[in-house]
Amino acid sequence: MKRQLLHTPEGVRDIYNEECEKKLILQEELYQVLKQYGYNPIQTPTFEFFDIFGREIGTTPSKDLYKFFDREGNTLVLRPDITPSIARCAAKYFGEEDMPIRLWYMGNTFINNSSYQGRLKESTQLGAELLGDSTVDADAEIIAMVVECLKRAGLKEFQLSIGHADFFRGLMEAAGLFEEQEEELRGLISNKNYFGVDEFVETLNLNENLKKLFHMLGTLYTDACGLKEVKEYAAAYPRIAEAINRLEELYEVLKVYQAERYVSFELGVISDYQYYTGIIFAGYTFGSGEPIVKGGRYDRLLTYFGKNSASIGFAFVVDQLLAALSRQKIEIPLAYENELIVYEPEKRLEAIRAAQEKRAAGGRVELIAKDGKKTQEDYSAYADRNRIAGVTFM
């Protein structure tokens, strides 16, 4: 029984020593970028009322939530996503603010995935939200900030796939699809089964231009030039055409940020979160089968909490990013500066004073009272195991 207590539940894990320190350093590097762009910190509770993440808002399915009850019988959930919590906070504390609000956050999220998916059920997210700005300039700032964060993390090769929620919704609207058909199509796109998409489209009675637009769901455009062809086919569909115009304008602003080489346009980008209304994106790099960052525009989410506000944001999955860095052999430098002082009991006063002086000067010092059963070699071996820079015996 005692051995069983040493194990964590399925889907969660311990992080310690070097890996934990690297994660903390990575988080600090990302935070510094957000700070340079003028974003302010915010913390929200680890659990919220169930309705914050309910179906109406369009977040995680109920079956994937960790649910429990408080003493009053209210249904609570561990947050699966931090953005709705930020939306709630913004509506509560910035309800009268009519100027842009820049917030960044970090915290753990919890999704009760099926075990066969092989994903962690607890992960750390670090993200930012820009509220109260509906312009393409805000879109570009968010994308440019993501690019800057990934570069600061040490990545050389990565790509952000950018789409627009209204491209997919415009197609559904133009084709007059039922809810069941839309769900089937979403499933095909999520699985990158574009052959299946083509077969599905052939069962519909659509004109050739609309068919062409459906076929473009699986196309990747490395710059905005390829979108011109899409515009030609979308001329008769205002919602789709406006989405393409927005992506073209976004590309022009990203060129000012010198971030355009890291982006591509993928019109089939969709999200499980239904609250996205504008651009939507996901970031990928080698060594990670899952996106390391996701984000998009959600101009109607805050209305559920009583505030009309355009909004856009992103969230890094810190654990995925850390794993990708490791697989690409990109080292997060660690400074091994700790010193160990091992002292005889009668030298306690001198040892503590010496340690305090070194700490006051910025040093890192561990103190251990010498055990008569251990040798100097034992303490030196301990120092090696824990990457302690030097050992002093007193």
Image (cartoon, grey):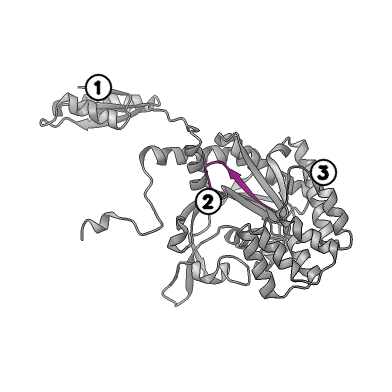
Q: Nearer the viewer, mark 3 or mark 2?
A: 3
- Give the residue at mark 3: 225
Amino acid under disc 3:
Cys
Q: Is residue 31 left or right of residue 121?
A: right
Amino acid under disc 2:
Gln
Nearer to me, 91 or 137: 137
What mark, if any, has residue 304 been given in the picture? none
Picture coordinates of residue 282, whole percent (x, y): 63, 50
The residue stretch that appears in magenta? 280-290
Nearer to me, 285 or 124: 285
Amino acid under disc 1:
Thr
Kindly report the distance in space between the C-alpha atoms of the residues bearing marks 1 and 2. Answer: 41 Å
Q: Residue at x 60, y 58 (%)?
A: 83
Q: Tell me which numbered mark, 1 or 2, is placed earlier along the sequence.
A: 2
Q: Tell me which numbered mark, 1 or 3, is placed earlier along the sequence.
A: 3
Does residue 255 show up? yes
Q: Residue at x 77, y 42 (%)?
A: 223
Picture coordinates of residue 392, whole percent (x, y): 25, 22
Q: Quadrant of residue 365?
A: top left
Furthest-left residue in view? 373
Q: Is residue 319 above or below residue 238?
A: above
- Give the residue at mark 2: 125
Q: Tell me which numbered mark, 3 or 2, is placed earlier along the sequence.
A: 2
- Give the residue at mark 1: 392
Q: Residue at x 21, y 22 (%)?
A: 393
Kindly report the distance in space between the C-alpha atoms of the residues bearing marks 1 and 3. Answer: 65 Å
- CB atoms of marks 1 and 3 within 8 Å: no
Q: Residue at x 44, y 77 (%)?
A: 72
